[in-house]
Amino acid sequence: MKKITNILCIAILSAISLASCDKGFDNVVEAEGKLSLKNFEATVQNAEDVIESRSTDIDVSSFRVVVVNKSTGAEAGSWVYNALPEIVALPVGTYTVNVYNKELQNAAWESPYFYGSQDFSIKENDVTTVDPIVCKLANLKVSIKYSDELKTAIGSGEDVKVNVTVGENSSLDYAYGETRAGYFRCDNENKSLVATFSGTVEGYYISEYKVISDVAQGQHRIITFSLKTAPDISDEYGAVGTTGLTLNATVTTVDMTSDIPAEEEIIQPDDYMTVDETELSFGMLASSKDVSVSASAEWTAASSTSWCTVSPANGASGTTTLKVSVADNTVEIERTATVTVTMGSIIREIAVKQAAYSEQPTAAAPTITSSTIDLLASNTVTAASKVDVDVLAPGKIANFFVKINMSDGNGGTLDLSSVNLANEFDLCNPGEYKDGLVGLGLPVEDDVKGKTEMKFDISGFMPLLVNYSGDHIFNIEVVDELGQSAKATLTLKVE
């Protein structure tokens, strides 16, 4: 595919001495240099427009071009692109030229904000050349979609909406059927997105939310809600209701600031399938690992060998956990397999590698200890309690399983899906729960997998735990690459 861009460039040309200043500037007596805007150009780069239309032209005639003195912060000149002066005089100093299409809003419909800048210096009686500017999307684009199954369950959807909030001050309500994209201010203070679904599904009112951390400028986050079933639980704190129904939200991210390689095939967001692992490594003993499959339609999975199996062999739209299992390797040769996941014409492959057989394990089994709590007793905790364990795994960590049974304060068990977590997960393969775990300060993926020692610190859970009286039990199991394991139970009590 050829990359389509609009050209809008900045350069500084040689200029003859001027006796007076150009429009937009007051007369100055200090030393000056010259700035030529005669051939002002830059590139407006919007990768998603290239993906979707392959021939997008963005009208830059109304873009603002603003020069700011870096030392004082004062505006030195401002013009509309199609009315730029050819030559201006500027006092000697350092400046920034900013190019943008409109003022940035906290949240607005169909309101992309393109921005680019370049620093340059003006020297006395000299000419400075400034490199071309690339204007990129500088806010966050968010679209809301629903699976076909959920659409059927919603029906007319008169009371259904999704509220999207980024940071503290950027919020939009997406009424059911809304096809417009929302654009949100996104900076260092606004890096977390919360999408809250509310409305009637199959005659029952449901309210659930999806938390996405570390959103960034230039992204297009496509949030797809789908229907799933769950055990009946109290909705006092999490909004699942007592219907046995709940929702699952999957997120597709399109980077709208990246170059699109020539001839690369781009799959549209309405037709997608992703796997969160493309390589899996196993020790010589039989074991299993989970892979998260997110798809827009039904899919199938198969292994290239009999010693490597997958379950389930097929799945529906939404997010599904695919378990990849290997049998004991009884030969002294490393072996490989390929797991192929197929949805129509879309194919994803997962490379599987298993270590060769050896006579005896070459490392001691994992151990779990703690200097902050008693692993053999119940521990009363507060919001400020320090709770952690130390893990040693000379054979390298392959899986770190955690099972949480949190009291809901009424004799039942709290369902953690309302805070973007599961009651059972693997830190080595967190899948869709990665953002929630990272938000609580827990290590995941490469910060756990392959490590020989680490600290499992759940102090970040304490402010949540203290809202629910009773016993909260964390069962952890660490499995190394040799198949050896260690288990521990953390029993925490809130009075």
Image: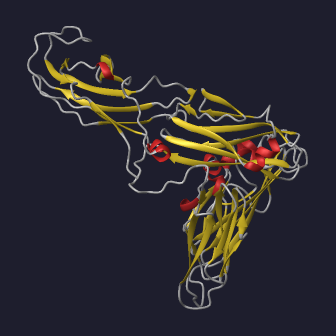
Query: As rendered, which of 477 and 194 lies closer to the eye?
Result: 194
Query: As rendered, which of 234 and 258 lies closer to the eye?
Result: 258
137 with respect to 468 (left or right): left
For this orientation, the residue located farthest to the right is 411
Image quarter of residue 7: top left
Q: Is residue 478 visible?
A: no
Q: How is the image coloured?
A: secondary structure
Image quarter of residue 85: top left
Q: Is residue 163 visible?
A: yes
147 with respect to 412 (left or right): left
Q: Position of residue 255 (x, y in %)?
A: 48, 46
In this rendering, the answer to whether 172 lies above or below 205 is above
Q: Residue at x 22, y 24 (%)?
A: 37
For this orientation, the residue located farthest to the top is 27
Q: Residue at x 52, y 47 (%)?
A: 254
Q: Position of residue 299 (x, y in %)?
A: 67, 64
Q: Position of residue 347 (x, y in %)?
A: 57, 66
Q: Quadrant of the C terminus?
A: top right
354 with respect to 262 (left or right): right
Q: How many marks?
A: 0
Q: Residue at x 68, y 68 (%)?
A: 300
In this rendering, the answer to whether 434 lies above or below 8 is below
120 with respect to 196 (left or right): left
Q: Position of residue 453 (x, y in %)?
A: 56, 65
